[in-house]
Image (tube, helix red, strand yellow):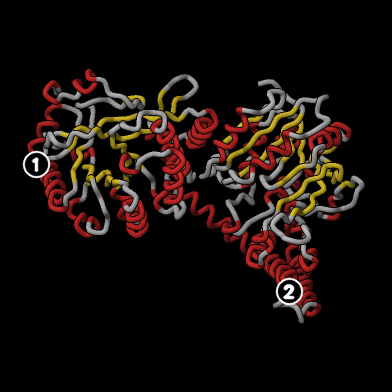
Amino acid sequence: MKEVDFTVAIPTYNGETRLPDVLDRLKSQINTEHFSWEIIVVDNNSTDTTAKVVADYQANWPKLIPLRYAFAPKQGAAFARQRAVEKARGEFIGFLDDDNLPEPEWVSQAYAFGKNHPQVGAFGSQIHGYFFEQNSKLELPEKLKEIACFLAIVERGNQPRLYDPKHKMLPPGAGVVVRKQAWEKAVPKTLFLNHTGKEAGLASEDLEALINIQQAGWEIWYNPAMVVYHKIPNSRLEKDYLLALVRCVGLSRNRLRMMTLKSWQKPLAFPAYMANDWRRLVLHLIKKRKSIKSDTATVCKTEFLWNTIKSPFFLYAQQRESQAKARSYPPIAKSEDWLESIATAFEEENFCLYTQSIFPISNQDLNRKHSEILLRIEDRKGRIILPGEFIPTAERYNLMGTIDRFVIRKLFTRLSQVSQDNDCLYEINISAASINDEKFINFLYQQFNIYGISPETISLGISEKIAITNIEQATKLMNSCKEIGFQFTLDNVSRSSLMPEYLKQLPIDYLKIDGQLVKGVANHQKNIRGIEQIHNLGYQLGIKTIAEAVENGNIMENIKLIGVDYAQGYAINYPQPLIFTFTEDQMNNFNLNTVSS
Protein backbone atom coordinates (compact mmCIF):
# COMPACT_ATOMS: atom_id res chain seq x y z
CA MET A 1 0.00 0.00 0.00
CA LYS A 2 1.17 3.48 -0.86
CA GLU A 3 2.46 5.55 2.07
CA VAL A 4 0.77 8.83 3.01
CA ASP A 5 1.90 11.83 5.05
CA PHE A 6 -0.78 11.82 7.75
CA THR A 7 -3.23 9.32 9.21
CA VAL A 8 -6.31 10.18 11.24
CA ALA A 9 -7.25 7.23 13.46
CA ILE A 10 -10.65 7.01 15.14
CA PRO A 11 -10.85 4.19 17.71
CA THR A 12 -14.49 3.43 18.45
CA TYR A 13 -16.65 0.98 20.33
CA ASN A 14 -20.34 0.89 19.37
CA GLY A 15 -19.93 4.26 17.71
CA GLU A 16 -22.68 3.98 15.08
CA THR A 17 -24.44 7.14 16.32
CA ARG A 18 -21.30 9.15 17.09
CA LEU A 19 -19.07 8.39 14.10
CA PRO A 20 -21.07 10.34 11.47
CA ASP A 21 -20.39 13.69 13.17
CA VAL A 22 -16.64 13.04 13.27
CA LEU A 23 -16.49 11.80 9.67
CA ASP A 24 -18.52 14.78 8.45
CA ARG A 25 -16.03 17.13 10.15
CA LEU A 26 -13.10 15.32 8.57
CA LYS A 27 -14.74 15.46 5.16
CA SER A 28 -14.76 19.25 5.50
CA GLN A 29 -11.06 19.71 6.35
CA ILE A 30 -9.30 22.52 4.48
CA ASN A 31 -5.73 23.40 3.44
CA THR A 32 -4.73 19.75 2.99
CA GLU A 33 -3.98 19.96 -0.75
CA HIS A 34 -0.19 19.96 -0.33
CA PHE A 35 0.07 16.63 1.48
CA SER A 36 -1.62 13.22 1.39
CA TRP A 37 -3.68 11.84 4.24
CA GLU A 38 -6.05 9.04 5.14
CA ILE A 39 -8.63 8.11 7.77
CA ILE A 40 -8.84 4.78 9.60
CA VAL A 41 -11.85 3.86 11.73
CA VAL A 42 -10.67 1.27 14.25
CA ASP A 43 -13.64 -0.83 15.33
CA ASN A 44 -12.86 -2.12 18.82
CA ASN A 45 -14.99 -5.29 18.63
CA SER A 46 -18.28 -3.37 18.43
CA THR A 47 -21.63 -5.14 18.63
CA ASP A 48 -23.55 -2.45 16.74
CA THR A 49 -23.49 -1.45 13.04
CA THR A 50 -20.22 0.50 13.17
CA ALA A 51 -18.84 -1.47 10.20
CA LYS A 52 -21.92 -0.69 8.11
CA VAL A 53 -21.72 3.02 8.96
CA VAL A 54 -18.13 3.07 7.67
CA ALA A 55 -19.10 1.11 4.56
CA ASP A 56 -21.91 3.55 3.79
CA TYR A 57 -19.52 6.51 4.09
CA GLN A 58 -16.90 4.74 1.96
CA ALA A 59 -19.42 4.46 -0.88
CA ASN A 60 -19.60 8.26 -1.18
CA TRP A 61 -16.20 9.31 0.13
CA PRO A 62 -13.68 11.48 -1.79
CA LYS A 63 -11.21 9.19 -3.55
CA LEU A 64 -8.24 11.43 -2.76
CA ILE A 65 -8.65 10.79 0.99
CA PRO A 66 -8.82 7.03 1.66
CA LEU A 67 -11.34 6.03 4.33
CA ARG A 68 -10.36 2.64 5.72
CA TYR A 69 -11.87 0.21 8.19
CA ALA A 70 -9.77 -1.73 10.72
CA PHE A 71 -10.89 -4.22 13.35
CA ALA A 72 -9.22 -4.40 16.77
CA PRO A 73 -10.16 -7.83 18.18
CA LYS A 74 -8.95 -7.19 21.73
CA GLN A 75 -11.22 -4.73 23.49
CA GLY A 76 -9.69 -1.71 25.19
CA ALA A 77 -8.56 1.74 24.10
CA ALA A 78 -4.88 0.79 24.22
CA PHE A 79 -5.41 -2.19 21.90
CA ALA A 80 -7.40 -0.04 19.48
CA ARG A 81 -4.64 2.58 19.32
CA GLN A 82 -2.01 -0.10 18.81
CA ARG A 83 -4.06 -1.54 15.95
CA ALA A 84 -4.28 1.94 14.43
CA VAL A 85 -0.49 2.31 14.55
CA GLU A 86 -0.04 -1.07 12.88
CA LYS A 87 -2.46 -0.17 10.10
CA ALA A 88 -1.50 3.49 9.61
CA ARG A 89 0.53 4.47 6.55
CA GLY A 90 1.23 8.05 7.65
CA GLU A 91 4.35 9.58 9.15
CA PHE A 92 2.06 11.10 11.78
CA ILE A 93 -1.02 9.56 13.36
CA GLY A 94 -3.70 11.86 14.77
CA PHE A 95 -6.05 10.18 17.24
CA LEU A 96 -9.64 11.36 17.51
CA ASP A 97 -12.17 9.71 19.78
CA ASP A 98 -15.59 9.11 18.26
CA ASP A 99 -16.95 12.09 20.22
CA ASN A 100 -14.19 14.51 19.14
CA LEU A 101 -15.16 17.16 16.57
CA PRO A 102 -12.09 18.71 14.91
CA GLU A 103 -12.09 22.25 13.56
CA PRO A 104 -11.65 22.60 9.75
CA GLU A 105 -7.88 23.13 9.97
CA TRP A 106 -7.13 20.45 12.54
CA VAL A 107 -5.47 18.07 10.08
CA SER A 108 -3.43 20.76 8.28
CA GLN A 109 -2.30 22.34 11.56
CA ALA A 110 -1.31 18.95 12.95
CA TYR A 111 0.74 18.03 9.90
CA ALA A 112 2.47 21.42 9.78
CA PHE A 113 3.38 21.29 13.48
CA GLY A 114 4.86 17.82 13.15
CA LYS A 115 6.96 18.75 10.12
CA ASN A 116 8.22 21.94 11.78
CA HIS A 117 9.29 20.15 14.98
CA PRO A 118 11.52 17.19 14.02
CA GLN A 119 12.17 16.26 17.67
CA VAL A 120 8.49 16.01 18.58
CA GLY A 121 7.22 12.52 19.35
CA ALA A 122 3.68 13.54 20.25
CA PHE A 123 1.63 16.72 20.60
CA GLY A 124 -1.82 17.43 21.93
CA SER A 125 -4.72 19.61 20.87
CA GLN A 126 -6.57 22.45 22.49
CA ILE A 127 -9.81 20.77 23.56
CA HIS A 128 -13.01 22.58 24.45
CA GLY A 129 -16.04 20.94 25.99
CA TYR A 130 -19.16 20.82 23.84
CA PHE A 131 -22.11 20.26 26.16
CA PHE A 132 -24.64 19.76 23.39
CA GLU A 133 -27.53 18.47 25.53
CA GLN A 134 -27.75 21.53 27.75
CA ASN A 135 -30.58 23.92 27.06
CA SER A 136 -28.88 27.16 28.02
CA LYS A 137 -25.13 27.78 28.05
CA LEU A 138 -23.13 25.13 26.19
CA GLU A 139 -20.25 25.14 28.64
CA LEU A 140 -19.05 23.27 31.69
CA PRO A 141 -20.93 24.25 34.84
CA GLU A 142 -18.80 26.49 37.04
CA LYS A 143 -18.89 24.04 39.93
CA LEU A 144 -17.21 21.35 37.78
CA LYS A 145 -14.42 23.43 36.23
CA GLU A 146 -12.04 22.26 38.96
CA ILE A 147 -12.19 18.73 37.51
CA ALA A 148 -12.31 19.68 33.80
CA CYS A 149 -9.05 17.80 33.12
CA PHE A 150 -10.79 14.50 33.91
CA LEU A 151 -13.18 15.21 31.02
CA ALA A 152 -10.29 15.68 28.56
CA ILE A 153 -10.83 19.44 28.39
CA VAL A 154 -7.46 21.09 27.68
CA GLU A 155 -7.34 24.90 27.53
CA ARG A 156 -3.75 25.88 28.29
CA GLY A 157 -3.47 29.15 26.40
CA ASN A 158 -2.96 30.14 22.79
CA GLN A 159 0.79 29.59 22.58
CA PRO A 160 2.53 26.26 21.94
CA ARG A 161 4.29 24.86 24.98
CA LEU A 162 6.67 22.02 25.66
CA TYR A 163 5.60 19.52 28.30
CA ASP A 164 8.53 19.40 30.68
CA PRO A 165 9.03 15.90 32.16
CA LYS A 166 9.74 17.53 35.54
CA HIS A 167 6.21 18.94 35.71
CA LYS A 168 4.61 15.52 35.16
CA MET A 169 1.87 16.86 32.93
CA LEU A 170 0.88 15.41 29.56
CA PRO A 171 -1.99 15.77 27.07
CA PRO A 172 -4.89 13.29 27.03
CA GLY A 173 -5.23 10.73 24.26
CA ALA A 174 -8.14 12.58 22.66
CA GLY A 175 -6.83 14.83 19.89
CA VAL A 176 -3.21 13.75 20.34
CA VAL A 177 -0.90 13.29 17.35
CA VAL A 178 2.07 10.91 17.48
CA ARG A 179 5.01 10.36 15.19
CA LYS A 180 4.64 6.75 14.03
CA GLN A 181 8.39 6.15 14.33
CA ALA A 182 8.36 7.30 17.96
CA TRP A 183 5.43 5.07 18.88
CA GLU A 184 6.84 1.99 17.18
CA LYS A 185 10.22 2.35 18.89
CA ALA A 186 9.09 3.44 22.35
CA VAL A 187 5.63 2.02 23.11
CA PRO A 188 5.28 -1.70 23.93
CA LYS A 189 2.50 -3.52 22.10
CA THR A 190 0.85 -4.44 25.38
CA LEU A 191 0.56 -1.69 27.99
CA PHE A 192 0.22 -2.34 31.69
CA LEU A 193 -2.91 -0.17 31.92
CA ASN A 194 -4.82 -1.94 29.17
CA HIS A 195 -8.46 -2.03 30.14
CA THR A 196 -11.92 -2.62 28.70
CA GLY A 197 -13.80 0.13 30.51
CA LYS A 198 -14.27 1.60 33.95
CA GLU A 199 -15.46 -1.76 35.30
CA ALA A 200 -11.83 -2.91 35.04
CA GLY A 201 -10.83 -0.20 37.51
CA LEU A 202 -8.08 1.25 35.31
CA ALA A 203 -7.58 4.27 33.05
CA SER A 204 -4.79 6.54 31.74
CA GLU A 205 -3.41 4.06 29.21
CA ASP A 206 -2.98 7.04 26.87
CA LEU A 207 -0.66 8.69 29.38
CA GLU A 208 1.29 5.45 29.78
CA ALA A 209 1.99 5.45 26.03
CA LEU A 210 3.05 9.11 26.07
CA ILE A 211 5.38 8.58 29.03
CA ASN A 212 7.08 5.79 27.10
CA ILE A 213 7.60 8.18 24.18
CA GLN A 214 8.87 10.94 26.47
CA GLN A 215 11.20 8.57 28.34
CA ALA A 216 12.70 7.57 24.98
CA GLY A 217 13.87 11.15 24.47
CA TRP A 218 11.14 12.53 22.25
CA GLU A 219 9.55 15.90 22.94
CA ILE A 220 5.85 16.25 23.72
CA TRP A 221 4.08 19.54 23.00
CA TYR A 222 0.78 21.35 23.36
CA ASN A 223 -0.35 22.84 20.02
CA PRO A 224 -3.31 25.22 20.49
CA ALA A 225 -3.73 25.69 16.72
CA MET A 226 -5.23 22.17 16.64
CA VAL A 227 -8.71 22.77 18.04
CA VAL A 228 -11.11 19.95 18.96
CA TYR A 229 -14.55 20.08 20.56
CA HIS A 230 -15.30 17.19 22.90
CA LYS A 231 -18.98 16.24 22.82
CA ILE A 232 -20.00 15.58 26.40
CA PRO A 233 -23.56 14.39 27.13
CA ASN A 234 -25.30 15.27 30.37
CA SER A 235 -24.85 11.69 31.58
CA ARG A 236 -21.11 12.30 31.86
CA LEU A 237 -21.71 15.20 34.23
CA GLU A 238 -23.65 13.07 36.66
CA LYS A 239 -22.04 12.34 39.99
CA ASP A 240 -21.91 8.55 39.63
CA TYR A 241 -20.19 8.71 36.23
CA LEU A 242 -17.63 11.26 37.42
CA LEU A 243 -16.87 9.27 40.56
CA ALA A 244 -16.23 6.12 38.52
CA LEU A 245 -14.00 8.10 36.14
CA VAL A 246 -11.80 9.72 38.79
CA ARG A 247 -11.64 6.46 40.72
CA CYS A 248 -10.07 4.73 37.72
CA VAL A 249 -7.62 7.57 37.16
CA GLY A 250 -6.59 7.51 40.81
CA LEU A 251 -6.14 3.75 40.92
CA SER A 252 -3.89 3.90 37.85
CA ARG A 253 -1.66 6.67 39.16
CA ASN A 254 1.08 4.65 40.82
CA ARG A 255 1.94 3.00 37.52
CA LEU A 256 2.53 6.37 35.84
CA ARG A 257 4.61 7.62 38.75
CA MET A 258 6.88 4.60 38.81
CA MET A 259 7.50 4.79 35.07
CA THR A 260 9.44 8.04 35.47
CA LEU A 261 11.77 6.65 38.16
CA LYS A 262 14.92 4.58 38.03
CA SER A 263 14.83 1.18 39.71
CA TRP A 264 16.85 2.31 42.75
CA GLN A 265 14.54 5.30 43.26
CA LYS A 266 11.31 3.34 43.46
CA PRO A 267 11.70 1.89 47.01
CA LEU A 268 12.55 5.36 48.28
CA ALA A 269 9.77 7.07 46.36
CA PHE A 270 7.00 4.78 47.59
CA PRO A 271 6.93 5.99 51.24
CA ALA A 272 7.49 9.58 50.12
CA TYR A 273 4.56 9.47 47.71
CA MET A 274 2.40 7.74 50.30
CA ALA A 275 3.12 10.35 52.96
CA ASN A 276 2.49 13.22 50.55
CA ASP A 277 -0.77 11.67 49.30
CA TRP A 278 -2.08 11.31 52.85
CA ARG A 279 -1.07 14.90 53.55
CA ARG A 280 -2.94 16.15 50.47
CA LEU A 281 -6.05 14.17 51.38
CA VAL A 282 -6.14 15.42 54.97
CA LEU A 283 -5.61 19.05 53.91
CA HIS A 284 -8.33 18.69 51.28
CA LEU A 285 -10.79 17.28 53.82
CA ILE A 286 -10.06 20.11 56.24
CA LYS A 287 -10.35 22.80 53.58
CA LYS A 288 -13.53 21.42 52.02
CA ARG A 289 -15.17 19.99 55.11
CA LYS A 290 -18.36 22.03 54.60
CA SER A 291 -18.93 20.80 51.05
CA ILE A 292 -17.45 17.32 51.32
CA LYS A 293 -20.82 15.65 50.71
CA SER A 294 -22.77 18.20 48.70
CA ASP A 295 -20.35 19.56 46.10
CA THR A 296 -19.69 17.18 43.17
CA ALA A 297 -16.22 18.52 42.39
CA THR A 298 -15.17 18.20 46.03
CA VAL A 299 -16.50 14.65 46.26
CA CYS A 300 -14.68 13.73 43.03
CA LYS A 301 -11.38 15.17 44.20
CA THR A 302 -11.74 13.30 47.49
CA GLU A 303 -12.36 10.10 45.55
CA PHE A 304 -9.33 10.75 43.34
CA LEU A 305 -6.99 11.39 46.27
CA TRP A 306 -8.22 8.38 48.22
CA ASN A 307 -7.79 6.05 45.23
CA THR A 308 -4.34 7.49 44.54
CA ILE A 309 -3.40 6.19 47.99
CA LYS A 310 -4.90 2.79 47.18
CA SER A 311 -3.26 2.67 43.75
CA PRO A 312 -0.04 0.69 44.51
CA PHE A 313 -1.94 -1.99 46.41
CA PHE A 314 -4.71 -2.22 43.83
CA LEU A 315 -2.28 -2.50 40.92
CA TYR A 316 -0.30 -5.21 42.71
CA ALA A 317 -3.51 -7.20 43.26
CA GLN A 318 -4.55 -6.65 39.64
CA GLN A 319 -1.19 -7.91 38.39
CA ARG A 320 -1.42 -11.06 40.53
CA GLU A 321 -4.99 -11.68 39.37
CA SER A 322 -4.03 -11.17 35.72
CA GLN A 323 -1.12 -13.61 36.02
CA ALA A 324 -3.30 -16.23 37.69
CA LYS A 325 -5.97 -15.81 35.00
CA ALA A 326 -3.39 -16.21 32.25
CA ARG A 327 -2.12 -19.43 33.83
CA SER A 328 -5.66 -20.80 34.08
CA TYR A 329 -6.26 -20.54 30.33
CA PRO A 330 -5.49 -23.69 28.36
CA PRO A 331 -2.86 -22.96 25.72
CA ILE A 332 -4.16 -22.31 22.22
CA ALA A 333 -1.66 -23.01 19.47
CA LYS A 334 -0.91 -19.90 17.41
CA SER A 335 -3.64 -17.90 19.20
CA GLU A 336 -2.13 -14.56 18.13
CA ASP A 337 -2.06 -15.75 14.52
CA TRP A 338 -5.69 -16.79 14.71
CA LEU A 339 -6.58 -13.49 16.33
CA GLU A 340 -5.03 -11.68 13.38
CA SER A 341 -6.90 -13.97 10.98
CA ILE A 342 -10.21 -13.11 12.67
CA ALA A 343 -9.44 -9.39 12.59
CA THR A 344 -8.51 -9.60 8.91
CA ALA A 345 -11.73 -11.51 8.20
CA PHE A 346 -13.73 -8.63 9.66
CA GLU A 347 -11.68 -6.01 7.82
CA GLU A 348 -11.71 -7.71 4.42
CA GLU A 349 -15.11 -9.41 4.75
CA ASN A 350 -13.59 -12.88 4.49
CA PHE A 351 -16.19 -14.55 6.68
CA CYS A 352 -18.33 -16.90 4.56
CA LEU A 353 -21.71 -18.44 5.30
CA TYR A 354 -22.11 -22.10 4.45
CA THR A 355 -25.18 -24.27 4.82
CA GLN A 356 -25.92 -27.94 5.43
CA SER A 357 -29.36 -29.44 4.95
CA ILE A 358 -31.36 -31.01 7.76
CA PHE A 359 -33.56 -33.59 6.04
CA PRO A 360 -36.81 -35.24 7.27
CA ILE A 361 -36.54 -39.03 7.44
CA SER A 362 -39.41 -40.36 9.54
CA ASN A 363 -42.52 -38.54 8.39
CA GLN A 364 -43.28 -37.48 4.85
CA ASP A 365 -45.34 -34.56 6.18
CA LEU A 366 -42.19 -33.02 7.61
CA ASN A 367 -41.32 -31.56 4.24
CA ARG A 368 -40.31 -27.99 5.02
CA LYS A 369 -36.75 -27.20 3.96
CA HIS A 370 -34.48 -26.97 6.96
CA SER A 371 -30.85 -25.87 6.96
CA GLU A 372 -28.09 -25.05 9.43
CA ILE A 373 -25.99 -21.94 8.83
CA LEU A 374 -22.26 -22.58 9.26
CA LEU A 375 -19.38 -20.11 9.41
CA ARG A 376 -16.07 -20.30 7.57
CA ILE A 377 -13.13 -17.98 6.88
CA GLU A 378 -11.64 -17.79 3.41
CA ASP A 379 -8.04 -16.64 3.80
CA ARG A 380 -6.05 -14.62 1.27
CA LYS A 381 -4.84 -17.80 -0.43
CA GLY A 382 -8.39 -19.03 -0.91
CA ARG A 383 -8.12 -21.70 1.78
CA ILE A 384 -11.36 -22.38 3.67
CA ILE A 385 -10.80 -22.34 7.43
CA LEU A 386 -13.20 -24.35 9.59
CA PRO A 387 -14.58 -22.89 12.85
CA GLY A 388 -12.83 -25.48 14.98
CA GLU A 389 -9.58 -23.70 14.15
CA PHE A 390 -10.51 -20.11 15.00
CA ILE A 391 -13.47 -20.35 17.42
CA PRO A 392 -11.32 -21.24 20.51
CA THR A 393 -9.38 -18.00 20.01
CA ALA A 394 -12.60 -16.06 19.42
CA GLU A 395 -13.98 -17.40 22.70
CA ARG A 396 -10.75 -16.55 24.55
CA TYR A 397 -10.85 -12.92 23.42
CA ASN A 398 -14.62 -12.32 23.80
CA LEU A 399 -15.31 -12.12 20.08
CA MET A 400 -18.19 -14.59 19.92
CA GLY A 401 -20.92 -12.00 20.51
CA THR A 402 -19.58 -9.93 17.63
CA ILE A 403 -19.37 -13.00 15.39
CA ASP A 404 -22.95 -14.03 16.27
CA ARG A 405 -24.25 -10.63 15.25
CA PHE A 406 -22.20 -10.65 12.06
CA VAL A 407 -23.70 -14.02 11.03
CA ILE A 408 -27.25 -12.79 11.71
CA ARG A 409 -26.74 -9.56 9.76
CA LYS A 410 -25.09 -11.41 6.88
CA LEU A 411 -27.85 -14.01 6.66
CA PHE A 412 -30.64 -11.44 6.95
CA THR A 413 -29.02 -9.31 4.27
CA ARG A 414 -28.95 -12.30 1.91
CA LEU A 415 -32.50 -13.35 2.82
CA SER A 416 -33.81 -9.85 2.14
CA GLN A 417 -32.49 -10.13 -1.42
CA VAL A 418 -34.43 -13.29 -2.34
CA SER A 419 -38.08 -14.06 -2.89
CA GLN A 420 -40.31 -13.74 0.14
CA ASP A 421 -41.84 -17.16 -0.62
CA ASN A 422 -38.54 -18.83 0.29
CA ASP A 423 -39.98 -21.45 2.66
CA CYS A 424 -36.95 -22.64 4.58
CA LEU A 425 -36.10 -22.75 8.28
CA TYR A 426 -32.56 -21.53 8.99
CA GLU A 427 -30.80 -22.65 12.14
CA ILE A 428 -28.28 -20.12 13.49
CA ASN A 429 -26.00 -21.11 16.35
CA ILE A 430 -25.49 -18.52 19.06
CA SER A 431 -22.89 -18.41 21.82
CA ALA A 432 -22.99 -17.96 25.57
CA ALA A 433 -21.88 -14.35 25.00
CA SER A 434 -25.14 -13.57 23.18
CA ILE A 435 -27.28 -15.44 25.69
CA ASN A 436 -25.80 -13.37 28.51
CA ASP A 437 -26.04 -10.09 26.58
CA GLU A 438 -29.17 -8.25 27.73
CA LYS A 439 -29.09 -6.17 24.54
CA PHE A 440 -29.15 -9.19 22.23
CA ILE A 441 -32.94 -9.50 22.11
CA ASN A 442 -33.24 -5.83 21.12
CA PHE A 443 -30.63 -6.44 18.44
CA LEU A 444 -32.77 -9.27 17.03
CA TYR A 445 -35.90 -7.08 17.00
CA GLN A 446 -33.93 -4.36 15.22
CA GLN A 447 -32.62 -6.73 12.54
CA PHE A 448 -36.07 -8.11 11.77
CA ASN A 449 -37.39 -4.58 11.34
CA ILE A 450 -34.46 -3.50 9.16
CA TYR A 451 -34.50 -6.47 6.79
CA GLY A 452 -38.16 -7.45 6.91
CA ILE A 453 -37.41 -11.09 7.71
CA SER A 454 -40.10 -13.29 9.23
CA PRO A 455 -39.09 -14.67 12.65
CA GLU A 456 -40.76 -17.97 11.72
CA THR A 457 -37.89 -18.64 9.29
CA ILE A 458 -35.26 -18.66 12.07
CA SER A 459 -34.34 -21.26 14.66
CA LEU A 460 -31.65 -20.24 17.13
CA GLY A 461 -29.33 -23.07 18.11
CA ILE A 462 -27.96 -23.24 21.66
CA SER A 463 -25.70 -26.03 22.85
CA GLU A 464 -26.94 -28.16 25.72
CA LYS A 465 -23.89 -27.30 27.84
CA ILE A 466 -24.38 -23.55 27.39
CA ALA A 467 -28.11 -23.80 28.10
CA ILE A 468 -27.58 -25.71 31.34
CA THR A 469 -24.77 -23.42 32.49
CA ASN A 470 -26.83 -20.31 31.74
CA ILE A 471 -30.30 -21.72 32.37
CA GLU A 472 -31.83 -18.49 33.73
CA GLN A 473 -30.55 -16.27 30.92
CA ALA A 474 -31.34 -18.89 28.26
CA THR A 475 -34.91 -19.24 29.52
CA LYS A 476 -35.41 -15.49 29.49
CA LEU A 477 -34.06 -15.13 25.94
CA MET A 478 -36.09 -18.05 24.62
CA ASN A 479 -39.35 -16.86 26.15
CA SER A 480 -38.85 -13.37 24.73
CA CYS A 481 -38.01 -14.72 21.26
CA LYS A 482 -40.89 -17.17 21.31
CA GLU A 483 -43.31 -14.28 21.64
CA ILE A 484 -42.36 -13.06 18.16
CA GLY A 485 -42.23 -16.44 16.46
CA PHE A 486 -38.68 -17.81 16.79
CA GLN A 487 -37.96 -21.50 17.04
CA PHE A 488 -35.15 -23.01 19.10
CA THR A 489 -32.82 -25.95 18.66
CA LEU A 490 -31.00 -27.48 21.62
CA ASP A 491 -27.68 -28.57 20.11
CA ASN A 492 -25.14 -31.25 21.07
CA VAL A 493 -27.63 -33.11 23.27
CA SER A 494 -26.01 -36.12 24.90
CA ARG A 495 -27.14 -36.32 28.53
CA SER A 496 -30.64 -37.78 28.51
CA SER A 497 -30.62 -38.34 32.28
CA LEU A 498 -30.39 -34.59 32.91
CA MET A 499 -32.87 -33.48 30.29
CA PRO A 500 -36.30 -33.61 32.02
CA GLU A 501 -35.28 -31.08 34.67
CA TYR A 502 -34.29 -28.31 32.29
CA LEU A 503 -36.42 -29.14 29.23
CA LYS A 504 -39.52 -28.21 31.18
CA GLN A 505 -38.09 -24.69 31.56
CA LEU A 506 -36.93 -24.22 27.95
CA PRO A 507 -39.38 -23.77 25.04
CA ILE A 508 -37.44 -26.05 22.68
CA ASP A 509 -38.65 -27.08 19.21
CA TYR A 510 -35.79 -29.38 18.19
CA LEU A 511 -33.34 -31.63 20.02
CA LYS A 512 -30.16 -32.13 17.99
CA ILE A 513 -28.45 -35.31 19.16
CA ASP A 514 -24.69 -35.00 19.68
CA GLY A 515 -22.58 -36.23 16.76
CA GLN A 516 -20.34 -38.44 18.89
CA LEU A 517 -23.38 -40.32 20.10
CA VAL A 518 -24.72 -40.68 16.55
CA LYS A 519 -21.43 -41.85 15.01
CA GLY A 520 -21.28 -44.86 17.33
CA VAL A 521 -24.89 -45.92 16.83
CA ALA A 522 -24.01 -48.70 14.35
CA ASN A 523 -21.57 -50.42 16.70
CA HIS A 524 -22.57 -49.67 20.30
CA GLN A 525 -25.81 -50.59 22.05
CA LYS A 526 -25.08 -47.87 24.62
CA ASN A 527 -25.30 -45.24 21.89
CA ILE A 528 -28.55 -46.70 20.59
CA ARG A 529 -30.10 -46.60 24.08
CA GLY A 530 -28.93 -43.03 24.59
CA ILE A 531 -30.46 -41.88 21.30
CA GLU A 532 -33.68 -43.77 22.02
CA GLN A 533 -34.00 -42.09 25.43
CA ILE A 534 -33.47 -38.62 23.94
CA HIS A 535 -35.91 -39.28 21.09
CA ASN A 536 -38.58 -40.78 23.36
CA LEU A 537 -38.37 -37.85 25.75
CA GLY A 538 -38.65 -35.44 22.84
CA TYR A 539 -41.68 -37.34 21.55
CA GLN A 540 -43.38 -37.13 24.96
CA LEU A 541 -42.78 -33.37 25.11
CA GLY A 542 -43.72 -32.70 21.50
CA ILE A 543 -40.14 -31.87 20.48
CA LYS A 544 -38.73 -33.09 17.15
CA THR A 545 -35.31 -34.77 17.09
CA ILE A 546 -32.36 -34.27 14.73
CA ALA A 547 -29.38 -36.59 14.40
CA GLU A 548 -26.22 -34.78 13.31
CA ALA A 549 -23.05 -36.40 11.93
CA VAL A 550 -24.99 -38.94 9.89
CA GLU A 551 -22.01 -39.91 7.79
CA ASN A 552 -23.11 -43.08 6.00
CA GLY A 553 -26.04 -45.29 5.10
CA ASN A 554 -25.47 -47.66 8.04
CA ILE A 555 -25.89 -44.82 10.55
CA MET A 556 -28.90 -43.59 8.58
CA GLU A 557 -30.70 -46.92 8.79
CA ASN A 558 -30.13 -47.15 12.54
CA ILE A 559 -31.50 -43.71 13.37
CA LYS A 560 -34.49 -44.28 11.05
CA LEU A 561 -35.30 -47.47 13.00
CA ILE A 562 -35.18 -45.48 16.25
CA GLY A 563 -37.64 -42.98 14.79
CA VAL A 564 -35.50 -39.82 14.76
CA ASP A 565 -37.30 -37.10 12.78
CA TYR A 566 -34.42 -35.43 10.92
CA ALA A 567 -30.89 -36.29 9.78
CA GLN A 568 -27.92 -34.07 9.02
CA GLY A 569 -24.52 -35.14 7.77
CA TYR A 570 -22.34 -36.27 4.89
CA ALA A 571 -24.75 -39.10 4.01
CA ILE A 572 -27.15 -36.39 2.83
CA ASN A 573 -24.86 -33.58 1.67
CA TYR A 574 -21.69 -31.73 2.53
CA PRO A 575 -21.65 -28.13 3.77
CA GLN A 576 -21.70 -25.76 0.81
CA PRO A 577 -21.74 -22.00 0.25
CA LEU A 578 -25.12 -20.56 1.18
CA ILE A 579 -27.66 -20.56 -1.64
CA PHE A 580 -31.38 -19.85 -1.50
CA THR A 581 -32.83 -21.80 -4.40
CA PHE A 582 -33.12 -25.55 -4.73
CA THR A 583 -33.42 -27.04 -8.19
CA GLU A 584 -35.32 -30.24 -8.84
CA ASP A 585 -32.02 -32.05 -9.35
CA GLN A 586 -30.73 -30.82 -6.00
CA MET A 587 -33.85 -32.05 -4.24
CA ASN A 588 -33.50 -35.41 -5.98
CA ASN A 589 -29.95 -35.66 -4.63
CA PHE A 590 -31.48 -35.81 -1.17
CA ASN A 591 -33.21 -39.09 -2.01
CA LEU A 592 -32.16 -41.24 0.87
CA ASN A 593 -32.59 -44.46 -1.08
CA THR A 594 -29.54 -43.59 -3.17
CA VAL A 595 -27.23 -43.11 -0.21
CA SER A 596 -24.46 -45.69 -0.02
CA SER A 597 -22.37 -46.48 3.01
Q: Is residue 584 above or below residue 512?
A: above
Of the residues shown, which amino acid type is indicated by label 2? Asp
The image quarter in which residue 362 lies:
top left
x 72%, y 32%: residue: 7
**What residue is disc 2 on?**
295
Q: Position of residue 554 (x, y in %)?
A: 11, 29
Q: Is residue 320 above or below residue 397?
A: below
In the rendered structure, the answer to whether residue 393 lies left or right of residue 97 reads left
Please state which of residues 268 and 458 is positioned toward the viewer in this rendering: 458
Q: Residues within 10 Å of mark 2 (few under 14, many from 20)?
A: some
The image quarter in which residue 264 lies:
bottom right
In the rendered structure, the answer to whether residue 172 lies left or right of residue 397 reads right
Q: Position of residue 514 (x, y in %)?
A: 23, 41
Q: Position of residue 17 (x, y in %)?
A: 60, 46
x 42%, y 45%: residue: 330
State the mark number for residue 268: none
Q: Position of residue 496 (x, y in %)?
A: 18, 51
Report whether residue 519 is seen.
no
In the rendered structure, the answer to whether residue 411 lies left or right of residue 134 reads left
Q: Quadrant of the C terminus?
A: top left
Q: Residues within 10 Å of mark 1 (few under 14, many from 20)?
A: few
Report whether residue 104 is seen.
yes
x 32%, y 30%: residue: 355
Label 2 element class: loop
Q: Is residue 55 above or below residue 479?
A: above
**What residue is disc 1 on?**
525
Counting the numbered discs, the total is 2
Cα distance between the residues tagged 2 and 1: 74 Å
